[in-house]
Image (cartoon, grey):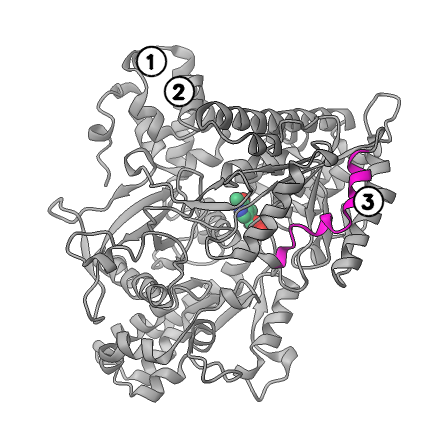
Amino acid sequence: MIDIKTKFPQIPDRIAGLGELAYNLWWSWHPDARMLFKMLNRSAWKVSIHNPVKMLHYIDREILDSASKDPKFLRHYDAVMARFTSDMKTGAGWFYENIADPGVLPIAYFSAEYGLHHSLPFYAGGLGFLAGDFLKESSDLGVPLIAVGFMYPEGYLRQRLAPDGWQGSESATLDRENSPIYRVLDDKGDRLTVKVPVIDPPIYVEVWKVRVGRVSLYLIDTNLEINDPWNRTISSHLYIGSIEQRLRQEIVLGIGGTEVLRALGIKHSVLHLNEGHPAFAILERVRERTEGGMSYKDAIEQVRETTIFTTHTPVPAGHDVFPFSLMEKYFSSYRAALGLDHDTFFNLGINPKDPDAGFNMTAFALKMSQYHNGVSKKHGEVARHMWQSLWPDTLEEQVPITHITNGVHVPTWLEPRAELLLTRYLGPGWLSEHDNPDIWKLVYDIPDEALWKAHYWLKMKLIMRIMERARQRWHEDKADTGIILASGVMLDPNVLTLGFARRFATYKRAALILYDVELLKKMLNDMWRPVQIIFAGKAHPDDDPGKHLLQQIFNTARDPSFGGRIAFVEDYDEQLAQYLVHGVDVWLNNPVPPLEACGTSGMKASLNGIPHLSILDGWWIEGFNGNNGWAFEGADDIKDSDSIYSILEKEVVPLYYKMDGDGFPRDWVKIMKEAIVSTAPSFSARKMVKEYAMKFYQAALKSEYDNNV
Ligand SMILES: *Cc1c(COP(=O)(O)O)cnc(C)c1O
């Protein structure tokens, strides 16, 4: 438990619930709760960068005192707290009405990254946001999830470009005292310390907790004094480059994470692995059973029947393969504890396509789980093809890897003003049924002009935000003028705006639209119908080709012949993503197919009425319906860039600038509406989590139950 009184001694009793609320990210997806903090003090809210824990630490006592006596504030406070208390009730919700009894043991969800809020920088990209959205939606649906991950004290990376556009890597140390995260203590009130079982030399971890509505997320930290210096840095940041340190990270996450749940007295029934990084958790569940006297064969069977594995990418860098020599170094005692010889143990991780490469975490997870899936229909096919050799007697179409298409957490990614507008037309209570496509048809009743005005307002908000960031960089960091010029200070709210924001992994082809620079210049600088593009995204610190792409875009952005119509905004994070997916006009996506397993930022944009212009890959193959955005088949860089230019010139630009008598593009608004109606319910985290529950959790829980009677 967290001692709120000690954390925030200055909060008067009448509004003491603010402290509880600040330490539960539930506030972040409930606009009324956000408004409550904002009402307390607008400027403190802004200065804290929308982080209530920080705000409550710094705010003047008088402000809190007067709020505790202000009838208007108190009415709002009481309403929010009532809703919060009712939403926190455990054993209630969709899951218990449809899937399992309230007595069921929790499902353990393991992931190397979580994207929950910008104040907790424990993510690099889509995998993390998927996990974060999964937890939030599980809370909403009452899925009894317990989540495990890493607390990365140095986060991912704070992006600052050098004057020549080269990305430097600065890590921003997490300010734990001012983040919605707290240390887990043991019975005696001391820091809970857990030893990673069996692994030599020993590694110790401490545990931190984040509350995500009804879901608890436990985060492992290795930065302890009793660990030797090399061990202390295991959890320092995401996706460490050295293969050995990466292996140690994954040992700590899977094996240490399972031990952490044990130390907390949390028994779990089912294990869900989000990507292969935490897959050693499987071994630890097997070891637990063999240690209890079960045969290895039975233990494997029980664990397999209750394990779910989601693979997230066909890109090789997403699948860790550890050399056997390294595996032997760390696992010799461990495999002995399992009673396995060297070959039997290594065999668990062999990819038959490349048996000498080492221990493949994806192959291992696939062999050791009963339920496995890709993250879109297309990715399911790709994964069946990739891993067919694990089922040599099975036809590719029948390889038992299915798919569940990703979705985004609607209350998180829908802009609050857009939410208000929808509530007006969809009716109160629509949000609780937002995976029902029929409800969304009422979007057609929203007056075109009202939707356009709301969009224009959000576009202004985005541009103002970008300018304010530039001003701060100029004033506070004395940033180089080239960086300021490239960062969007010449953006114009009346110009058609494309958004391209994602990790700068090369397969995402950030610079594809620069393929024909002369043609692009003409389009951007068109006197009557200009176009502008906003780019954002980070390259992985070890990815030099990605950094080159970024530099190319930066150089284009500050080249006067592009007329200030290209912007590169530094430090893409959750907050900037929110502004972008709410405020640009078109969301651009052009990876090399079929490498984008799903993609989720386009879903966030579409949900807010921002149509997707995308190559047919990932979710867009399922999402595109001919009227809700634009699509093209992938071929090669030349043809694909041609497709984009041609769609822009023939369709997007003319439609955007075709104003009707009332001075706004009515036909464009039709596409915006179609984007919302056709994608919001089907690509929601609600639909996704329900699908996991119905396809996997229910059956796995039944196996668990059968094993125990
Ligand atoms: C949604 C999101 C992503 C994932 O986007 P993709 O389209 O899957 O590349 C990455 N980063 C941030 C900040 C996001 O919000």
Question: Distance between the Cα atoms at labels 2 and 3?
Answer: 47 Å
**Is the residue marked by circle 1 packed among few (<14), some (14-19), or many (20+) residues within 10 Å?**
few
Comparing 468 with 218, the one in front is 468
Which residues, given as a range, are shown in magenta? 507-525
Q: Residue at x 48, y 36 (%)?
A: 29
Type of secondary structure dominating the magenta stretch: helix
Q: Residue furthest front?
A: 164
579 sits left or right of 332 in the view: right
Vertical placement of residue 240 versus 74, above or below: below
217 sits left or right of 158 in the view: left
Residue type indicated by callout 2 = Ala
Where does residue 517 sit, x and y in percent of width and height? 76, 46
Vertical placement of residue 641 versus 474, above or below: below
Where does residue 480 sit, x and y in percent of width and height? 52, 31
Residue corresponding to mark 3: 519
Q: Residue furthest left?
A: 188
Task: Give yes or no for contact between labels 2 and 1 (Cβ–Cβ under 8 Å).
Answer: yes
Specify whether residue 539 is in view: yes
Question: Is residue 515 located in the magenta-colored stretch of the structure?
Answer: yes
Q: Quadrant of the N terminus?
A: top left
Question: Is residue 166 located in the magenta-colored stretch of the structure?
Answer: no
Identify the mark at residue 227; answer none if there is no mark: none
Task: Give yes or no for contact between labels 2 and 3 (Cβ–Cβ under 8 Å).
Answer: no
Residue corresponding to mark 2: 44
Residue type indicated by callout 3 = Leu
Q: Quadrant of residue 116?
A: top left
Vertical placement of residue 595 versus 49, above or below: below
Residue type indicated by callout 1 = Ile
Specify whether residue 435 is in view: no
Helix, strand or loop at mark 2: helix
Identify the mark at residue 63; answer none if there is no mark: 1
Question: Distance between the Cα atoms at labels 2 and 1?
Answer: 10 Å
